[in-house]
Image (cartoon, rainbow, N blue to C red):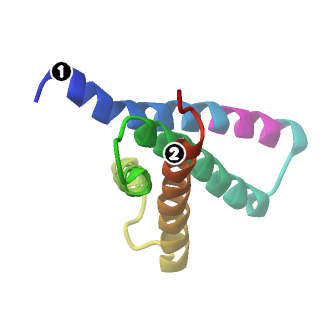
Amino acid sequence: MNKKSVLEMIRPLISEAVATILALLILALLMLKMEWGSKPIGGAVLVVYGIACFLGGWSAGRHTGKKKFLAGLVYGALYFVLLWLASLMGGGQPSGDTSRICTAFAVCAMAGMAGGMFSGFVGKA
């Protein structure tokens, strides 16, 4: 495996991370200015995850020949696993609310798959 193929495999994850960081910074600013409670923030974080996974799935789909939806699904699921591991490293509880964990996984996987499918329609030369 050469450097170029490894970079192409990591590029969608990098785009997901950058999108997440930017969106969470915007969300933190909105939280500060509008004094939101914890309920809307939980939903907004899921939206941020969805947007990031959609962009990552789109990026993965653009560099995949066939089965773009599967590439997006894999990158969305991988993004969720990386988020979960980062949460554990940051002192999070592994035995959190199961429904929230499943919802976050579903959002990440489905948004990544949607991004992969979207890449098949947009950006063709």
For the record, the magenta segment spans: 24-32
Compared with 55, 8 (above or below) is above
Instruction: Check disc 2 and give the amino acid type.
Output: Gly
**Mark carried by residue 3:** 1
Residue 100, image x, y percentages: 55, 72
Does the magenta-highlighted stretch encompass residue 26? yes
Residue 58, image x, y percentages: 51, 41
The residue under the point 29% across, 35% down is 9
Q: Would you call the spot at circle 2 few (<14 residues within 10 Å), some (14-19), or many (20 or more)?
A: some
Residue that lies at the very extreme toward the front in this rendered image? 125
The residue under the point 37% across, 51% down is 71
Residue 34, image x, y percentages: 89, 42
- Give the overall secondary structure of the magenta segment: helix
Does the magenta-highlighted stretch encompass residue 75? no
Q: Distance between the Cα atoms at labels 2 and 1?
A: 25 Å
Give the left or right position of residue 74, taking residue 20 as reference: left
Whether label 2 touches label 1, CB < 8 Å: no
Q: Secondary structure at mark 1?
A: helix
The residue singled out by tag 2 in the image is: 120
